[in-house]
Amino acid sequence: ANQYLFLLDAPKPFKGTLIQKDNVPTKTAVIARTNAKLFDYAVENIDKKLHFVGGIDSYNFQDLIDIQSLQWGKNDYIRNGFIKKFYDMDELIDYADEANEIDLKVKITTVRKYMKYKIRDLVKELRENSVKNQKDANLILTTGHKSKGLEWDQVEILDDFVNLREEIEADGECIVNKEELNLLYVAITRSKQNLLIDDNYFFDVDLLKQIKDSITIV
């Protein structure tokens, strides 16, 4: 982890242990970059006892419900004024692509994944099955922003944070917002002992030397 955090010029590198997925103890704090990714993870683990830091209603899953309403042509049911002004799903997708709205793109991808389900019913089921006390949970769910100031023994980082390796391989260069790097740093350093994170988020020293001129931090 120190090698990657060298790129962030991080004052406090992660000093715990990177562990394999099949060695995961029961209780883990899971941190996503976006609400939509957290929703996806929660649905995939809906049979477990889930605790949403700050409560499930603080993650604005309503936007996913609204985008699904747009997809189904039920515009009168849309609560979000911004989403409501789009005529249909194609128009929303075009906007997300042109504006490069990452959060919106993740929401659209998530809604498409669950197009055979009523997202409203999935949110209701998550709300009914979630537990208020972290001690009673198998999984503690939160986002990078909401995780600030908190710590857990074991943390899993989901793959919707900025991925420098992916962007460089796709375009040969990477222009990244410093706030996005800082948010990843915050998420990584929430772990006191064990950290689960995709290998793509780490670089060895030789590779860093090769690609550093391809990375622009703004």
Image (cartoon, rainbow, N blue to C red):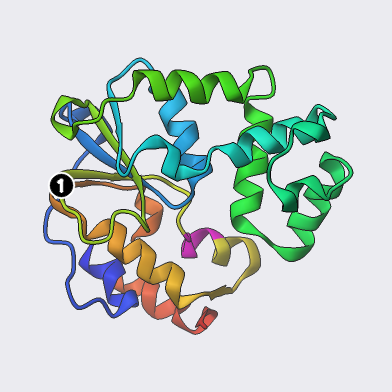
In the image, is residue 4 above or below residue 103?
A: below
Q: Nearer the viewer, residue 10 or 110?
A: 110
- Find the magenta span and give its range: 162-166
- Residue at (16% x, 25% y) in the render: 136
Question: Which SS class for mark 1?
Answer: strand
Q: Tell me the residue that label 1 is attached to.
A: 152
Q: How would you classify the magenta stretch by its main secondary structure?
A: helix
- Residue at (44% x, 73% y) in the render: 179
- Residue 135 at x, y = what percent? 13, 30
Is residue 150 shown left or right of residue 114? left
Please indicate, yes or no, whether residue 127 appears anywhere in the rendered image: yes
Is residue 105 shown left or right of residue 31? right
- What kind of residue is marked 1? Trp
Question: How many numbered dots are placed on residues in this image?
Answer: 1
- Residue 149 at x, y = what percent? 21, 61
Disc 1: CA contacts within 10 A as few (<14), some (14-19) or many (>=20): some
- Residue 61: say if magenta: no
- Residue 164: say if magenta: yes
- Residue at (44% x, 80% y) in the render: 212
